[in-house]
Image (cartoon, grey):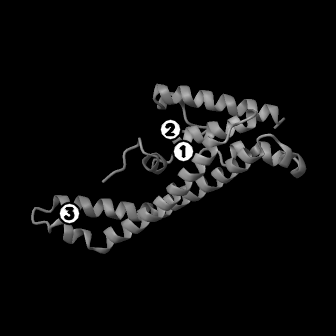
């Protein structure tokens, strides 16, 4: 079974969500530690950096699980094509299904952690552009809007083009405000 691209799992599997790593954590990185601690959006910036790190880990886990997912998809296709196929319950008991379920469980743990983190970010009010940029990055993740710098606008749906344009403008303004 192929995941639909409207889910974050399907979107990340398609490879479009990672974008530039820690792009929105830059304002924290360029501030001296004392100044970063006093920044009005310090908590959001730290949560944003954690979000970027976790996104990288999630993407790595999904890439690690890709061979398992592919073996499972091939096994299901073979099972579907076999006119004398065994009952699905017997098929499910075989290792490839168990291995896939274990991989999906590990990915689900990452997605659950990301959901908890994005909830914390959404709940924290932004006081400046840097905090708003963190929220924009999370909104892009939540809406499955590709953040890749090389993604051509014509290859995206209109609503995604509009959102991405807005998110990138917020990011640009935050970087300019941080003098990056």
For marks 2 and 3, the one nearer the N-term is 3
Q: What's the mark number on residue 121? A: none
Circle 2 sits in a helix, a strand or a loop, which is it? loop
Residue at the image point whose x is 42% and y is 45% from the top: 7
Quadrant in the picture for residue 42? top right
Q: Which residue is mark 1?
A: 17
Which residue appears at 76% of the width and 44% of the height? Answer: 26
Q: What is the CA distance from the residue labelled 1 to the residue labelled 2?
A: 10 Å
The residue indicated by pointer 2 is: 143
**SS at badge 3:** helix
Q: Which sits earlier in the primary sequence, circle 1 or circle 2?
A: 1
The reply to whether residue 147 is visible in this rendering is no
Label 1 crowd bin: few (<14), some (14–19), many (20+), radius 10 Å: many
Seen from the viewer's position, the closer of residues 161 and 177 is 177
Question: Nearer the viewer's eye, disc 1 or disc 2?
Answer: 2
Tell me residue 27's x, y (percent): 78, 42
Q: Residue furthest toward the left?
A: 84
Q: Is residue 180 left or right of residue 116?
A: right
The residue carrying pointer 3 sits among few (fewer than 14), some (14 to 19) or many (20 or more) residues within 10 Å by Cα, namely some
Q: Which mark is residue 79?
A: 3
Q: State the separation of the CA atoms marked 3 and 1.
A: 32 Å
Q: Quadrant of the C terminus?
A: top right
Residue 54: % across, % down: 61, 56
Q: Nearer the viewer, residue 14 or 103?
A: 103
């Amino acid at each position: 079974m192929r995941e639909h691209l409207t889910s974050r799992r399907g979107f990340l599997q398609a490879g479009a969500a990672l974008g530039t790593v820690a792009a929105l954590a830059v304002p924290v990185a360029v501030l001296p530690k004392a100044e970063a601690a006093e920044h009005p959006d310090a908590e959001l910036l730290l949560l944003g950096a954690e979000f970027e790190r976790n996104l990288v880990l999630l993407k790595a886990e999904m890439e690690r699980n890709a061979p398992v997912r592919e073996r499972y998809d091939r096994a299901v296709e073979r099972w579907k094509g076999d006119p004398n196929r065994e009952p699905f319950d017997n098929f499910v008991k075989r290792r490839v299904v168990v291995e896939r379920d274990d991989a999906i469980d590990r990915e689900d743990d990452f997605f659950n952690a990301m959901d908890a983190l994005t909830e914390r970010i959404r709940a924290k009010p932004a006081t400046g552009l840097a905090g708003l940029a963190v929220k924009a990055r999370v909104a892009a993740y939540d809406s499955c809007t590709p953040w890749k710098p090389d993604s051509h606008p014509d290859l995206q749906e209109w609503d995604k083009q509009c959102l991405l344009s807005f998110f990138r403008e917020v990011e640009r303004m935050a970087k300019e405000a941080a003098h990056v």
